[in-house]
Image: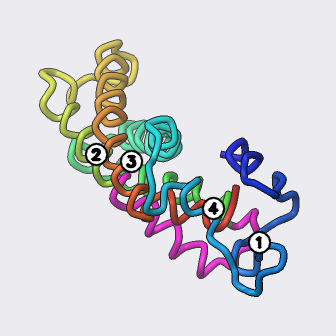
C-alpha cells in the first residue's frame, strides 16, 4: 500500500512515520485524515486492496491449517481434534502476521492486539468456515493422509474458495473503515 502514499498531494512516502494521530497539513492545527480514503475508510475500495488484505489473512490461515494437520496427524488425533487444532492455529498465525506489522510500527502490544482482533477476526472466521467446510464436505478429504495427493488438492481448492468468498467481505469491511482499514491506521 505504500505506493498509495506517494500520490497524496504534498506528501511523500512518510519514512519513519509511525502514526497518523499527530500528522497535520501545513498551516493547519487540525490532525488530518488524508489516509482514510486511501485505505478505504468510508470511501471506495479497490478489489486489489481487498485481495491483498485477504491474501494476508489467508497466508496466516494456511500456515496454521497445514501445521495443525501435521501436528494432529503426527499425534494420531482424529479428524475433529485435528480440525480444531488447525482452526486455532489458523487464527493464531493470522493474528500473528498482523501483529508483526503493527508492532514494527512502534505500537504498544495491548493496542496492537486490539487492532489485530478488530482487523482480522471476521476475515479469518469466514475463511475458516469456507476452508473447513469444503474439506469436511469433499468426499474422502477428511480421511486423506498428508502423503495423499487428494489431501493437497482439496486443501488448495478449499483455500482458493476461501479467498474468493472472503475478498468481497474484506472489501465491504475496508469500505466501512473496518477490517484491514484499521491496520493501515498504524502501519504502511
Q: Indicate the secondary structure of the residue bearing disc 3.
A: helix
Marks 3,1: beta carbons within 8 A: no
Reply yes or no: does residue 137 show up in magenta. Answer: no
The residue to which callout 3 is attached is: 171
Reply yes or no: does residue 113 show up in magenta. Answer: yes
Which mark is in front, 2 or 1? Answer: 1
Tag 3 or tag 4, which sits nearer the N-term?
Answer: 4
Which mark is in front, 3 or 1? Answer: 3
Marks 1,4: beta carbons within 8 A: no
Give the residue at x 23% y 46%. Answer: 129
Q: Which residues are magenta?
A: 103-124
Position above or below: 27 against 133: below
Tag 2 or tag 4, which sits nearer the N-term?
Answer: 4
> Which quadrant does the N terminus fall into?
top right
Give the residue at x 63% y 61%. Answer: 35
**Outermost residue, bottom side:** 29
The residue to which callout 2 is attached is: 83
Q: Which mark is residue 46?
A: none
The residue to which callout 4 is attached is: 35
The residue to which callout 1 is attached is: 106
Which mark is in front, 4 or 3? Answer: 4
Measure the alpha-carbon separation of dots 4 and 2. 39 Å
> Which quadrant does the C terminus fall into?
bottom right
Give the residue at x 29% y 30%. Answer: 161
Which mark is in front, 4 or 2? Answer: 4
> Would you call the spot at circle 3 few (<14 residues within 10 Å), some (14-19), or many (20 or more)?
many
Tag 1 or tag 3, which sits nearer the N-term?
Answer: 1
Q: Is residue 71 in view? A: no
Q: Indicate the secondary structure of the residue bearing disc 4.
A: helix
Amino acid at each position: 500500500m505504500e505506493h498509495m502514499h506517494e500520490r497524496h498531494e504534498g506528501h511523500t512516502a512518510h519514512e519513519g512515520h509511525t502514526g497518523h494521530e499527530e500528522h497535520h497539513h501545513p498551516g493547519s492545527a487540525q490532525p488530518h485524515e488524508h489516509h482514510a480514503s486511501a485505505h478505504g475508510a468510508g470511501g471506495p475500495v479497490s478489489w486489489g486492496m481487498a485481495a491483498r488484505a485477504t491474501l494476508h489473512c489467508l497466508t496466516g490461515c494456511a500456515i496454521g491449517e497445514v501445521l495443525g494437520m501435521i501436528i494432529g496427524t503426527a499425534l494420531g488425533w482424529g479428524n475433529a481434534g485435528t480440525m480444531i487444532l488447525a482452526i486455532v492455529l489458523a487464527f493464531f498465525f493470522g493474528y500473528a502476521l498482523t501483529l508483526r506489522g503493527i508492532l514494527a510500527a512502534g505500537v504498544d502490544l495491548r493496542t496492537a492486539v486490539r487492532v489485530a482482533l478488530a482487523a482480522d477476526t471476521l476475515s479469518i472466521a469466514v475463511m475458516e468456515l469456507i476452508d473447513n467446510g469444503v474439506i469436511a464436505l469433499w468426499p474422502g478429504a477428511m480421511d486423506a493422509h498428508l502423503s495423499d495427493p487428494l489431501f493437497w488438492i482439496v486443501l488448495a481448492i478449499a483455500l482458493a474458495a476461501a479467498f474468493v468468498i472472503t475478498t468481497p467481505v474484506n472489501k465491504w469491511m475496508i469500505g466501512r473503515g473496518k477490517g484491514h482499514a484499521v491496520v493501515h491506521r498504524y502501519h504502511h
